[in-house]
Image (spheres, helix red, strand yellow):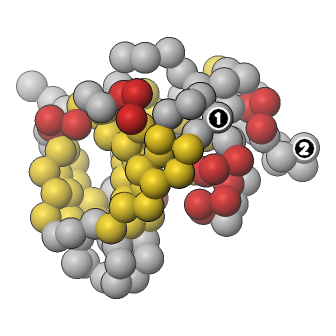
């Protein structure tokens, strides 16, 4: 049985608990993640959606993605913390921002995805697997 882990937003209005191990842990360099974060990439994990319990009410913002799906980004409407991502083509999984974890050092990225959109000045860890587009479906 997987160990649970938890996290939440900066003000504490939204909390979550996950009871499954991550399906994938990655740095996403797509333009949408760059715009949403104000940074060169977002570090996140994908977990089974059914394994996550959320307390509080995240607000979601939806945008089309380069893959043709819809990205639904969940954040706290009170403090603005970015927490979740749900992709229409991957309804069985939910993305969780690593920085929203209570212990963000517990997990670390194993791959860089959407490297085709990476900023030229961003120095990626050479030891991580690189994918020009998104990861294959789980």
Q: Are marks 2 and 1 in contact (CB under 8 Å)?
A: no
Mark 2 and mark 1: Cα distance apart in space: 19 Å
Instruction: Write the residue at 42% across / 71% down.
Output: 81
Viewer-closest of 123 and 51: 51
Q: Quadrant of residue 134?
A: top right
Q: Quadrant of the N terminus?
A: top left
Name of the residue lying farthest toward the right: 120
Residue 107: image tag: none
Question: x, y percentage for residue 60?
Answer: 37, 61
Q: Residue at x 41, y 50 (%)?
A: 72
Q: Which residue is mark 1?
A: 66
* Mark 1 surroundings: few (<14), some (14-19) or many (≥20) residues within 10 A: some
- The reply to whether residue 111 is visible in this rendering is no
Near-viewer residue (74 or 47): 74
Image location (x, y in percent) of residue 122: 82, 47
- Above or below, comparing residue 36 to residue 22 in the picture: below
Q: Secondary structure at mark 1?
A: loop
Q: Earlier in the sequence, mark 2 or mark 1?
A: 1
Q: What is the quadrant of the C terminus in the image? A: top left
Residue topped by disc 2: 120
In the depicted structure, whether residue 70 falls above or below residue 114: below
User: In the image, 102: left or right of 57?
Assistant: right
Circle 2: element type: loop
Task: Give me the residue at 63% from left, 50% from top.
Answer: 32
Q: Is residue 90 visible?
A: yes
- Which dot, 2 or 1, sits closer to the camera? 1
Q: Is residue 110 above or below residue 105?
A: above
Identified at 21% across, 69% down, the residue is 57
């Amino acid at each position: 049985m997987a160990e649970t882990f938890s996290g939440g937003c900066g003000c504490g209005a939204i909390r979550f608990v996950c009871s499954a191990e991550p399906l994938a842990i990655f740095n996403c360099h797509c333009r949408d993640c760059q715009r949403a974060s104000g940074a060169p990439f977002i570090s996140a994990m994908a977990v089974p959606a059914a394994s996550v319990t959320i307390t509080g009410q995240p607000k979601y913002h939806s945008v089309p993605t380069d893959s043709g799906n819809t990205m639904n980004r969940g954040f706290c409407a009170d403090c603005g913390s970015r927490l979740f991502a749900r992709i229409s083509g991957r309804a069985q999984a939910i993305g969780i921002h690593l920085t929203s974890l209570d212990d963000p050092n517990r997990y670390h990225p194993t791959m860089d995805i959407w490297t085709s959109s990476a900023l030229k000045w961003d120095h990626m860890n050479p030891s991580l697997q690189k994918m020009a587009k998104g990861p294959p479906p789980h």
